[in-house]
């Protein structure tokens, strides 16, 4: 049976929950943007989003596909010799989304670790939380579920401690009442 969080850690748990909720939503949005970018790049459209350069403010540049590139090349380690080269100039927004999600996933993992360790959950729960940052839409469902569970847990523990404190106060005032 896992240990329960100490009442003294409840304020830290609330802060960790807020941090987790924000990180979860940002990570989920970044993952959806990354998914859209991957679909545009690896689908028959073969385009990437660029900012600035010769195409204007925001524009799609073609991705030059080398020989040996098939739809399944993305799922094979090494890509079967598939070479993709972007023909755009300016800031590669698609690449920025990829890098941004990767770095923010590290922040998301820290948020997951913090709420997991403060709540003293089992390790499998940490793995489920971590998957929220790599499975599209899962972070939104996990965020809602975790927030609901943590808030309910804190409310129940605080009402229990309030009832115990009230009972001990009554017992001290009237020792014959039990």
Image: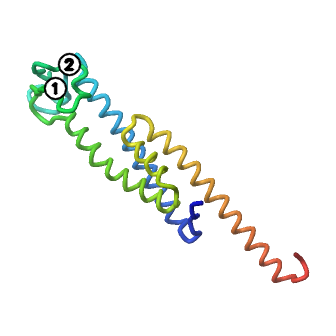
Q: Which of marks 1 and 2 is nearer the N terminus?
A: 2
Tell me the SS state at disc 1: helix
Query: Above or below — where is 138 with respect to 116?
Result: above
Query: Distance from label 1 to label 2 (Cα)?
Result: 9 Å
Closest to the observer, 177 or 49:
177
Task: Kindly identify the residue that appears in the image at 40 percent across and 47 percent down.
Answer: 130
Residue 7, located in which quarter of the rendered image?
bottom right
Label 2: which residue? 70
Q: Are marks 1 and 2 in contact (CB under 8 Å)?
A: yes
Tell me the SS state at disc 2: loop
Query: Above or below — where is 75 with respect to 132?
Result: above
Query: Above or below — where is 100 with respect to 160?
Result: above
Task: Kindly identify the residue that appears in the image at 42 percent across and 49 percent down.
Answer: 22
Direction from residue 94 to residue 107 in the image, left or right: right
The label on residue 80 is 1
Task: Kindly identify the residue that appears in the image at 91 percent across and 81 percent down.
Answer: 176
Closest to the observer, 20 or 117:
117
Residue 135 coordinates in the image, percent (x, y): 39, 36
Direction from residue 59 to residue 26 in the image, left or right: right
Of tags 1 and 2, the one toward the viewer is 1
Residue 167 coordinates in the image, percent (x, y): 79, 73
């Amino acid at each position: 049976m896992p240990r329960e969080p100490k009442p003294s850690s409840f304020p830290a748990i609330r802060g960790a929950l807020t941090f987790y909720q924000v990180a979860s939503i940002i990570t989920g949005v970044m993952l959806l943007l990354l998914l859209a970018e991957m679909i545009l790049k690896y689908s028959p459209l073969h385009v990437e989003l660029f900012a600035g350069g010769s195409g204007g403010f925001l524009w799609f540049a073609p991705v030059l596909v080398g020989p040996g590139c098939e739809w399944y090349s993305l799922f094979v380690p090494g890509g079967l010799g598939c070479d993709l080269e972007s023909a755009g100039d300016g800031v590669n927004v698609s690449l920025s989304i990829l890098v941004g999600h990767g770095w923010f996933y590290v922040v998301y993992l820290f948020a997951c670790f913090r709420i997991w360790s403060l709540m003293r959950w089992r390790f499998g729960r940490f793995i489920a939380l971590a998957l929220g940052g790599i499975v599209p839409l899962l972070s939104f469902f996990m965020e809602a579920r975790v927030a609901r569970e943590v808030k309910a847990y804190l409310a129940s523990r605080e009402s229990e401690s309030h009832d115990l404190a009230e009972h001990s106060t009554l017992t001290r005032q009237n020792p014959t009442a039990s």
